[in-house]
Image (cartoon, helix red, strand yellow):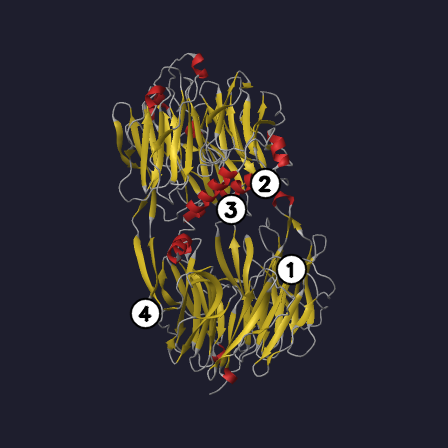
Amino acid sequence: MAADLETRLRLARPADGEPTAEATARALRAFSRRRRGRGRSAVAWVTRTPRGRLLGVAVLLAAGGTGVAATLLPGGGGRATPVSRGAITAEWGPAFAVAPVFPRGQIPKPVAGMDPSGAVLVAWSRGRRIEVRRRPPDGPWGPTTRLSGIGVGTARPEVAFADGGRAAVVVWRERMGGRVIRRVLRLPDGSVAGVIQRRVGTRYVVVARRWSATGGWGPRVQVSPDSSGNRRDMSDLAVLGRPNGAFLIAWPHAGRIQTRTLRADGGLGDPQEVTPPRAGEVSEPVLADRGGTPLVVFAHRERPVWSHDGAVMASAADGPGWEPPVRLGTGLALNERPVVAARGSRILVAWTSRSTGTPMGIVVSEHAGGTWSPQVRISSPRREAYSPGAGFDRAGTAVASWSVGAATQVSTRAPGGAWTAPAGVSRAGLTGAYSPEANPVASTGDGDLVLALGTRGGLRVADWRGGRLGGPVTAAGSTGWQFGYSGIAAAPTGSAALLMTTFSEDGAGISVTIREPAGLGRDKEAG
Amino acid sequence: MTTPRRSLLCIATLALAGVAGCGGTDAPAQQATPSAWRTPELQPPTTPPAAARIAGLPGGRVVAVWATRPGGTPSRLLSAIREADGTWGAPRQVAPREPVPRTGVRVTANRRGQAIASWALWDRPSGAVFAFTQTATMAADGTWGPTQTLSRGTNGLAETGVAHLDDGTAMVVWSGSERRDGSYHPGSKAALRVRGRWQAGRVIGDGQRYQLAAAAVPSTRSIVTTWERFDGNTKRRLMSQTWRSRGGWTPPRAVSGPSDRPQEMTTAANPAGWIIAAWGGGGRGLHIAHRSPTGGWGTPRTLLSSGYLQGLTASLGDDGTAVITATIWRGATRPVRLEAWTVTANGAPSRTVLSRTRIGTGPGNRPSLPSYSSAVNLTAGGGAAVAWAGPTQPQDRSTPVITVTPLDGSAPTTVPTTGDGVVGAIRLTGTRDGAELLEWEVQVLTGNRTETYRASRP
């Protein structure tokens, strides 16, 4: 029993403050005991159950998180396959486990992308290696492919498509070198007090592998020109599909955002940098396409501590380089990533702000007509809001969603109009404990939006079409608990994919549920 | 054996946040014209940081010990000796580089010029679950001996305490949860080094406390430890127990009152064997107790009958004169005060209000306590001064000046800080020839680094 207790204590704090397997199990047990049917509406549920609000805030503090739109959007320069619009009425298929259950203590942090034809690419880091799995539009899922070498120590990957889905890329940070220090500690009587073993002197680099429909996976390419010994560098990556099958990759390094183009032939362009006007730490880059010009949005804070709110900066490409960054607003909470939506030359950036003199809320800034608008708070000034999502529909209406404790709310702004009052659309907040930065508003690429909404124990999805939000449908009955959202992607075909991190007593896993036009092979996944 | 005259005993501390109290007097009006501070100078990176722990050596020298871990590299434990003229020597390695951090560094020295350091070595690079108590001894020539591990994995270990007698007898104390009887129990432990050999740690109390301490009493060749007895949230008491070279351990005794329920506690000791303990908080004010080298613990005294505390520090001079500093507040609408008390073993306490301010507004419109950094310097002649900076609100970007306030009523002086950053730890010390040295750290906002500055005056 003592050994068990010691083991539990020693395993109690995995790196980076991730919840332990025990904490996950406890939450699962508590969740399974919770009774359903308590709420009447989103707001009523919050009002009657203050614990729900506390739970939401706790999850937010533990996980944080907003989203990356660009990486989940279809790549630039592609041509959508014409498909009957009626296909969007297709139902969501069963959840498919794309990866086996992870060992206890390992938390998958998957990412997914969908190309214009509806093909899905899922990537994750497992046991210090990067693995991917692809599903063509007509299914079924292909085999798992390991992209990284053995024992290189990888972090969470990012994926993107280009050339209409005929090219894809997976980028990740890889560990290089270092040595292991092993120290045996002995008590005065000579007995062993403990052993400390750690790797030191490690360097990090950004690497990528291209995929093409004709050639499959290409060789590993080191994208970053320099390595870094700072673990915070290159921990957040962004990638954007560009015309002619190229990809633009961005990462933070030594207080600057570095970018580089991975060309279709596998070659690399010259590295470029975005340098903030004041020194500090940059993080959370997001890439978007603003009318054919790349745009990078990132966080900048002078000190990486809780009391120093981050500024949201944006810089547009200027020829081969970047323009001086523009400060969009402040208050970005630590470890939160802004959400970016793009349509033509319009850009909408939303983030979780906590320094507006009110409870944490959702703040947006919009780029239209060549200028950025001042930051505006669109969530209630009286309630804590988190997990923003953003998108544009074909009429140019900006759609933003966020969570308030135990509800998901939506606000819209028609061109030339003002933001509408928040409306509750779901009975639970949408929180992704392990992939918190996945934008819950996915663009189909042709003007429709698909919104992921939270439920208590599962996930719901609603379509935004013709300026209206359709009725939410349950896409996943249960992810183990309500915090399993990991991403959503959509395509002009009407296909959409919902990425989930699942939890069970045995461990965590990765599942994807897909909605696609009828007859495109969903039946192949049964069983 | 001679007893060198020490010009100072200083404990530099970082005092965080504080708020309003009642009564008391503001800093006395100007009575004398102090000499001016020289222009602050940026110190090279090899200089001990202001947060380094220091101990006085014979001849007016000082030894500093500190841990470093720049940029995720292996942690280093370094020491440096400051000569009597105030110049720091080159750093020396105290213990091998380790891939994990060290915290809770303490150092003390005996009258032979030997020093002993203790610290907690984490079991992982961040968020330690277990830590190991370690110690090393410095010979009179400045060389450090091998590192000795004293504890098996201790959960919650963050601080250590150490005491050193002239004959080499030493004690290291720590607290945390260790495995005992098939489970983990919070407690405080002490390990003794007698005749050159370290003994296994011994449980001295069932409480767990960060501010535990050990103090050597040369006149009786004994070592006194203090810790917190913890019988539940409402039954916390500061305890003390003595180990004598002849006779072993005495039974523990309570130092704090039965109803004090302290939230903040601190202790300080000097080489002569004086100990000062201060505790309070939780709205129950501030209390102290003195222990003389020969007379044992005195009756606890109350400095404040009510109020909340933060950043409680205690410093002791050679003659047992103590200076207590704390940030005091009594509610969101009352001013916050940084205060200092000068306390002798038997005389009436003297109180000085160093600064007062309002509670600020932090993120989310929530009340936010301002923070102060402070350090105390006590001279052999009985003089005392407090160097302090603040108040600093969480969103502040810089601290404009450091104020040095003598506690004898002399006029305060100010030293402008340099650079775009907030003042962190401060160290105020004196040299044998009577000069004062003010060293401080600036957490530079542009570049996320720390710089050390130094100013002096004759």
Q: Residues within 10 Å of mark 1 (few under 14, many from 20)?
A: some
SS of the residue at dot 2?
Answer: helix
- Using residue A90 as the reference point, say whether residue B236 is left or right of it: right
Label 2 marks a residue whose chain is: A
Spot the residue most to the bottom. B1
Three-letter residue code for mark 1: Gly
* Along the line of sight, the residue nearer the viewer: A43 or A15: A43
**Mark closest to the chain's N terminus, 4 or 3:** 4
Q: Amino acid at mark 3?
A: Glu
Q: Amino acid at mark 4?
A: Gly
Residue type at the position of mark 2: Arg
Eye-nearest disc, 2 or 4: 2
User: Mark number for residue B282?
Assistant: 1
Give coordinates of residue B175: x percent, y percent: 48, 65
Contact check, label 1 and label 2, Cβ < 8 Å: no
Please give left or right for residue A418 compared with residue B173 in the image. right
Q: CA distance from mark 4 to mark 3?
A: 48 Å
Badge 4 and badge 3 in a common chain: yes
The earlier-in-sequence mark between 2 and 4 is: 2
Nearest to the eye among marks 2 and 3: give it.
2
Disc number for residue A302: 3
Alpha carbon separation for disc pair 1 and 2: 27 Å
**Mark 2 surroundings within 10 Å by alpha-carbon count, few (fewer than 14), some (14 through 19), many (20 or more):** few
Please, is residue B355 above or below residue A94 in the view?
below
Q: Tags 4 and 3 in contact by the CB under 8 Å rule? A: no
| Quadrant, the N terminus of chain A | bottom left
Q: Is residue B375 visible?
A: no
Chain letter, disc 4 residue: A
